[in-house]
Image: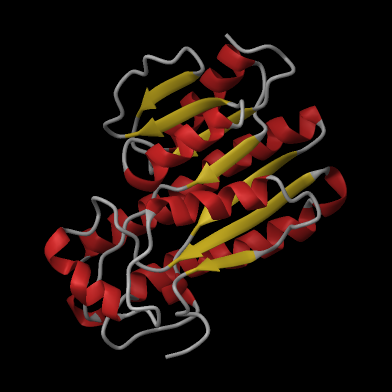
Amino acid sequence: MSTQDQKVAVITGASQGIGADLVAAYRKQGYAVVATSRTIAPADDAGVLTIQGDISDPATAERVIAAGVERFGRIDTLVNNAGIFVAKPFTDYTQDDFAAVTGVNVTGFFRITQLAIEQMLAQGGGHIVNVTTSLVDNADARVPSVLASLTKGGLQSATKSLAIEYATRGIRVNAVAPGSVKTPMHPEETHEVLASLHPVRRMGESSDVTDAVMYLQNAPFVTGEILHVDGGMSAGH
């Protein structure tokens, strides 16, 4: 059980990889955490509330925010980490691909962010972090990824729009745009090729993204920022 003085973070896509590391990072900072994903298991830590659900379903967002407020009394940070990445030539995408990617990357962001901001406004402030992809700004012919650009690109634009809309009301909104990161999303046999896409010739670690999110969390004068954590991809090739 949280006290009213303890801050609370909500993290989507929290069962593995970057999401699981974000749960640990926020706990280390003293936050209570509401962690959600389709398959997340109950937590042994009383400071972590886990909620299973498909974030593309608005009902999941409503359950997550309501349960977080009921358990901990407030919501201070939302990290929209859940995402689907499907790399295909444009004409090979199916309607199922489109529905799956837009469902998680856009619909999943939309409703939970609305609800979190409503709660933050009632409290007097808060922070949103959206996890996108460096490919939004740096298209690569070796990685055809229009659906990532369409959806995560929308999140980057929404990041700036929300940052300005709520700048005078105590809510900051930022994004982290990673390159390819070693997570369960990428099978080990793909790592060599993915490493070659980055000017530094290696993939990122989950901790690189977590460190970037924690920087933004603790940077009160930073809002509307798209922080690239991509081994130089955003600088050029």
180 left or right, relative to 112 = left
The answer to which of 152 and 107 lies nearer the viewer is 152
Q: Is residue 126 above or below residue 88?
A: above
Quadrant showing the N terminus: top right
The answer to which of 106 and 20 lies nearer the viewer is 20
For image coordinates 78% across by 29% down, the residue present is 122
47 left or right, relative to 92 = right
For image coordinates 64% across by 51% down, the residue present is 215
> How is this picture coloured?
secondary structure
**How many callouts does the rendering have?**
0
- Percent across and percent down for residue 126 are 72, 39
For image coordinates 70% across by 35% down, the residue present is 118
Q: Residue furthest right?
A: 168
Q: Residue furthest left?
A: 189
For image coordinates 78% across by 37% down, the residue present is 125
- Percent across and percent down for residue 170 are 82, 43
The answer to which of 51 and 33 lies nearer the viewer is 33
136 left or right, relative to 142 = right
168 left or right, relative to 153 = right
Quadrant showing the C terminus: bottom left
Q: Quadrant of residue 197?
A: bottom left
Q: Is residue 60 above or below residue 71?
A: below
Q: Quadrant of residue 32?
A: top right
- Percent across and percent down for residue 139 are 40, 83
- Percent across and percent down for residue 92 are 17, 76
